[in-house]
Amino acid sequence: SDRFNTNRPDLCPALRWKGQFILAEPDPTVPRSNDGLFWCLHTQTCIGPDGELAEPGNCHSKKRACHGTGKCG
């Protein structure tokens, strides 16, 4: 689903997900897992500083006040 797409060019640099820490080459024969385990570097939870879910579908717009800053305004 596009909601979990981590290949967005404007993704917030504070968004983290489990797949970032797996040091292995992608294997096209293995189905991709969209387990939805995302968190914000600033809050260390699945909720961003503005109270919204920290996931690619929400964390890709510079219109979001906390985008890359961890501040809400």
Image (cartoon, rainbow, N blue to C red):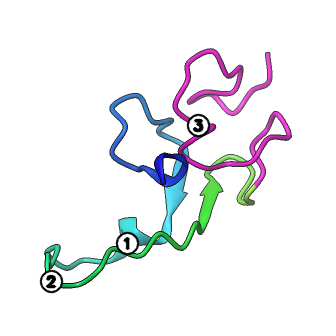
Compared to 13, does 17 lie above or below? below
66 on left or right of 52: left
Mark 3 or 2, which is nearer the eye? 2
Give the image location of residue 45, x and y in percent: 75, 60
Q: CA distance from mark 2 to mark 1?
A: 20 Å
Q: Is label 1 in a helix, a strand or a loop?
A: helix
State the residue lying farthest toward the front: 1
Taking the view exactly as shown, the residue that stands out farthest to the bottom is 30
Q: Is residue 24 shown above or below 14?
A: below
Q: Residue at the spot x=48%, y=54% of the render?
A: 1
Which secondary structure is most common in the magenta stretch?
Answer: loop
Residue annotated with mark 1: 21
Say whether residue 68 is left or right of residue 50: left
Counting from the top left corner in percent of width and height, residue 69 is at 62, 27
Quarter of the image with the C terminus in it: top right
Packing grade of label 2 (10 A; few <14, some 14-19, many >=20) is few
Quarter of the view holding residue 66 = top right
Residue at position x 47%, y 39% in the image: 13
State the separation of the CA atoms marked 3 and 1.
19 Å
The quadrant holding residue 44 is bottom right
Q: Nearer the viewer, residue 5 or 18?
A: 5
Q: Amino acid at mark 1?
A: Phe
Q: Secondary structure at mark 3?
A: loop
According to the picture, the residue beneath numbered tag 3 turns out to be 59
Q: Residue 29 got which mark?
A: 2
What kind of element bears circle 2?
A: loop
Kind of residue at disc 2: Thr
Q: Which residues are magenta?
A: 47-73
Which picture quadrant has residue 71?
top right
